[in-house]
Image (cartoon, grey):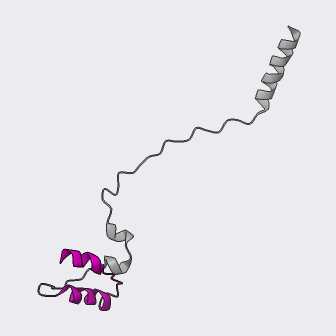
Amino acid sequence: MLVWLSTTTALRAQDARTAPAEPAPQPVTIADEPNTVDPAAFMPPQLAATASVDFTSSSLREVLNWLREKQNLVVLLENDALSEIG
């Protein structure tokens, strides 16, 4: 019985010497704003730039050339897929 009492007292003394527990983490809060995200904010400036051009009677080649030359964009064309379409 004495052994049990002295062990319990020793354990309580150890608990008193330990560092205080860290505070519980706060729950994550998600802001309501912004309600929408502008996709242009995540795009390179060249792709986010606006341009108004009339391609009504233009061929695909003319459109691609305009994108490459005037907008300085790299445009890759998959010729096999275009051949399948006709």
Which residue occupies the foreground of this view, 39 or 84?
A: 84
Residue at x-position 35% and y-position 55%: 33
Residue 68 location (% of width, % of height): 31, 88
Report the quarter where the N terminus lies.
top right
Residue farthest to the bottom?
69
Residue 63 location (% of width, % of height): 22, 86
Residue farthest to the left?
57
Which residue occupies the foreground of this view, 4 or 69?
A: 69
Name which quarter of the figure residue 71 lies in.
Answer: bottom left
Is the residue 4 above or below the residue 68 in the image? above
Residue 82 part of the magenta segment: yes
Is the residue 36 above or below the residue 66 in the image? above
Which residue occupies the foreground of this view, 51 or 35?
A: 51
Q: Which residues are magenta?
A: 58-86
How many labels sit on residues?
A: 0
Residue 73 part of the magenta segment: yes
Name which quarter of the figure residue 50 lies in.
Answer: bottom left
Report the quarter where the C terminus lies.
bottom left
Is the residue 55 above or below the residue 23 in the image? below
Name which quarter of the figure residue 65 lies in.
Answer: bottom left
Residue farthest to the right?
2
Residue 82 location (% of width, % of height): 23, 78
Is the residue 81 above or below the residue 37 in the image? below
33 sits to left or right of 83: right
Residue 31 location (% of width, % of height): 39, 51
Residue at x-position 84% and y-position 18%: 7
Residue at x-position 37% and y-position 79%: 45
